[in-house]
Image (tube, helix red, strand yellow):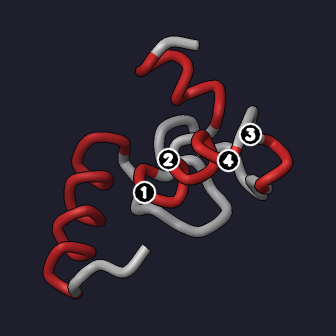
Amino acid sequence: MNRSPQMQEFVNDMSEKLFGRKPSNNQCVSCGSEKVKQKDFRDDLSYKEFTMSHMYQECQDSVFGR
């Protein structure tokens, strides 16, 4: 996902304030699970959500419901 540098900085700051960590490509911002892979997600839409929110499948389920 292409975000402006300002938007990415905002997302990073909010993630750090809310979860204590900044988003990274292979880590869940919510639970800290590392080495997250696309195959770990139920479907393409769930993986797309990860690319935006950096939340692992289980964390998405707890926030949005299954």
* Mark toward the start of the polypeptide (3 vs 2): 3
Q: With 10 as the anchor, is 26 left or right in this view?
A: right
Q: Are marks 3 and 4 in contact (CB under 8 Å)?
A: yes
User: Which residue does the numbered mark 2 point to in the structure image?
Assistant: 49
Please name whichever residue, 52 or 22, is drawn nearer the observer in this view of the structure.
Answer: 52
Mark 4 residue element: helix
Q: Are marks 3 and 2 in contact (CB under 8 Å)?
A: no
* Residue 52 position by quadrant: bottom left
The residue carrying pointer 2 sits among few (fewer than 14), some (14 to 19) or many (20 or more) residues within 10 Å by Cα, namely some
Q: With 59 as the anchor, is 41 left or right in this view?
A: right
Q: With 12 as the anchor, is 26 left or right in this view?
A: right
- Look at label 1 and name its amino acid: Met
Question: In the picture shown, does residue 58 fall above or below 6?
Answer: above
Residue plotted at (17% across, 67% down): 10
Residue 41, numbered label? 3
User: Which residue does the numbered mark 4 point to in the structure image?
Assistant: 44
Between marks 1 and 4, how big is the CA–CA gap?
A: 13 Å
- Look at label 2 and name its amino acid: Glu
Can you tell which of label 1 and label 4 is closer to the viewer?
4
Q: Quadrant of the N terminus?
A: bottom left
Q: Are marks 2 and 1 in contact (CB under 8 Å)?
A: yes
Mark 3 residue element: loop
Mark 2 residue element: helix
Q: Are marks 1 and 4 in contact (CB under 8 Å)?
A: no
Between marks 3 and 2, how big is the CA–CA gap?
A: 10 Å
Q: Extreme bottom residue here? A: 5
